[in-house]
Image: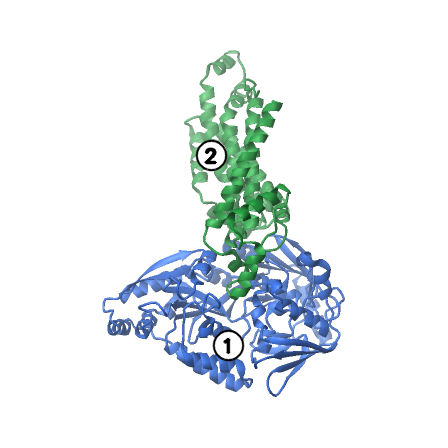
Chain colours: A green, B blue
Amino acid sequence: MGTYLVRRLLLTVPVLLGVTFIIFAMVRMIPGDPAQVIAGEQATRETVETVRRSLGLDRPLLLQYVHFLGDLLRGDMGRSTRSLRPVAQELADRFPNTIELTLAGMLVASLIGVVAGVVSATRQNRWPDTLSMVVALAGVSMPVFWLGLMLILLFSVKLGWLPPVGRGSWAQLILPALTLGAASAAILARMTRSSLLEVLRQDFITTARAKGLAQRAVIYKHALKNAMIPVVTVMGLQFGTLLSGAVLTETVFAWPGLGRLIVESILARDYPVVQGAVLLAALSFVFVNLVVDLLYSVLDPRIRYE
Amino acid sequence: MRGFPLRVLAALTVLLLAGVPAVAQKTGGSLVIAQGVDAVTLDSHLVVDAPTFTVTSHLFETLFEYTPDGKIVPHLAESYTVSSDNLVWTLKLRRGVKFHDGTPLDGEAVKFNLDRVLNPETKSTYRFLISRITKIEVVDPTTIRLTTEKPFAPMLAHLTHGAIAMQSPAAIQKHGKDYINFPTGTGPFKFKEWVRGDRLVLVRNADYWGKKAFVNEVVFKPVPEGGARVALVETGAAHAIVRVPPRDAARLAASKDVEVINTPSVRTIYIAFNQLKAPFTDLRVRQALNHAVNKESVVQHILAGVGRPSDAPISPGIFGYRPIMRYEYDPAKAKRLLAEAGHPNGFKTELYCPSGRYLNDLQVCEAVQAQLREVGVDAALKTMEWAAYLEITKKGPEESVVPMFMLGWGTVTGDADYGLYALFHSSQWTPAGQARHFYKNPKVDELLDRGRNVAAPAAREAAYKEAMDLIMKDASWLFLHAESQLTAVRKSAKGVIVHPVERVMAQQAWLD
């Protein structure tokens, strides 16, 4: 287990190195001159050139990359070209908010998804099954933007129960979490249903039933745990999706998260922030995958990591 | 509603006690303004965008002020004189003004600020506004003298610009690179906190030299989605929101709690013809295209009335503006002109268009495209996001590939010089300047120089009128419209002012 963990952690190094290279090259490939954007459309050429020099963007690309890597190794991600604040500070301001939203979205998705999946599977082809699968289909198909605005319209404007946008109180977390979690809930519901149905057909379930176990015990103690492995895999993937997909939800709900920061920074050609933020997102993705892999062995003791 | 009669009674009492004023302003409370984006920086000398200027104009003040009704009046300066040769400007500063950190605003402080903007290392975009100043002298603590080599009539207008605002020299020196976290001005509000992407809070300056603010706090919230902003003002979670989506304006205006304010902006939207590229080298072609587009219909249907068809290259409210002319919508005339120019069957070209930068910009371009097709001009629409767009339209005469492109220009100093010189003087061609469409008319150059170099307002106005006449007759642009700003304000928030330079001002606002 220990050596496995060390090996996995070491493997993240080349992954992240690759990410730095790709993102470094990509932000510079998109057209648009950061110096011009920073100085604004009314700036004179001298100002634009001074800005360019001060950003070091007049140096050869390879040299810029080497400097970027060198600074990164020393823990320095540079300063935002827009706000002039250290990138680390920008990320520290935003990342916890995105994690908060993602976790809440994940909670919503898992609760609704797993419960709906179990209900469907245990009442296969009866109306609760049909209903939850139709709702799931709707959940996957609904654009986040639209769903978010509809929820605001209903719960904030019409009913007045919840604050429309912003971050701070628990109440402000509910609508964005629902919006973010909806699509994932739907996917998890379908996944849970099919996985559970498969398990329910297996011999050890028949055995459990033959022992005279109650339906509840059969489902929750024996079937569900075995059905969870593919579900957890999908959850892990969904977590990544939520993390990076939070940008739309963040935009609708004016949530001060990482996704919005990345989009704003791309539009402003704020290279250092884009680089730092994407690196952070990649790091979280790698981390979540590792956690998922470790969870397998918890769910199924036959799985061992040497 | 239960407290209503009591409140009325209280208000009446105040009225009776106060006697004269018709409305009693209340102090206290926190006024929330939702904008589309967060502020970028709080170093006023480095600000370039209107939403950030909205924030900084509550913190910082300028020597002169461009008032919402279009006047230029002394502000931190109390009065001024200009020498008979129009080269030396002597400004008398207001006494007793202090920055938020207690530093006095004196001649040295003003010199420090102007020097800082002028220093290329500061990288102030708006350095060019005052770059004609060659000498800055502090005569005594309340007098400062500015010298230019040539007369520079727009001087006062340029000193109203938010990027030339006064910031505490002590704070700038003390905090260096971190000054953005400690912005220190002389304004009616002081900086309190900035939670990036969530809220920026200013607090009332109890020691303000002028008329003190009424509200305790002004909170700026960045809310990118238009629909979400509307929900904020509808529910009362915000008192004012900018950029109301035109589709929501009628519904909001019908609400008993919200008022929708339509304020003309100094931003002119146009489609420029690259005057070095055939067929736009031909005056008749440029005129034809102006006749081919129904600008009234564009404003009415695409902008839902949130704009004003242009009758000059700059908009009303700017010094020097005069209604010049409009190219009436006449497709038959357009076809005739095209035929005369040797294009009886029209031609193919490209129309570059930003997306999401200006109000319904892409939709406007699509409407123009459809109307040009009616007269046989097949303009392929090219759209890209802002940064890429700026780059492709900023090429020099040899490299430029854009035949027609939409852009907007905000004359934020309120002076025609700013709106015309940068775009129509042939010395200002890109990439060095801003004139991206390579217009050149020696007579216009001469008139714009005159407008800059003579001091008498009447003579300047005459020069600008003549210049604009030529620019319009030359059909230098496809003239479209001036934008308006739709702002929604809760009726409980009184005295919120929307400035034509796209600022929401809460300096004298109060909450009922």
Amino acid at circle 1: Ala
Does residue A54 appear anywhere in the picture? yes
Residue A187's disc number: 2
Quarter occupied by the C terminus of chain B: bottom right
**Residue at 49 percent of width and 16 percent of height:** A205
List the single residue furthest toward the bottom: B84
| Position of residue B165 in the picture relative to residue B352 (left or right) | right
Q: Position of residue B505 (x, y in %)?
A: 60, 67
Name the mark nearer the viewer: 2 or 1. Answer: 1
Instruction: Tell me the quarter of the picture where residue A72 sits.
Output: top right
Does residue B510 appear anywhere in the picture? no
In this rendering, the answer to whether B257 lies above or below A299 is below
Residue bearing the label numbered 1 = B416
**Residue at 61 percent of width and 49 percent of height:** A78
Amino acid at circle 2: Ile
| Position of residue B120 in the picture relative to residue B111 (left or right) | left
Q: Position of residue B353 (x, y in %)?
A: 40, 60
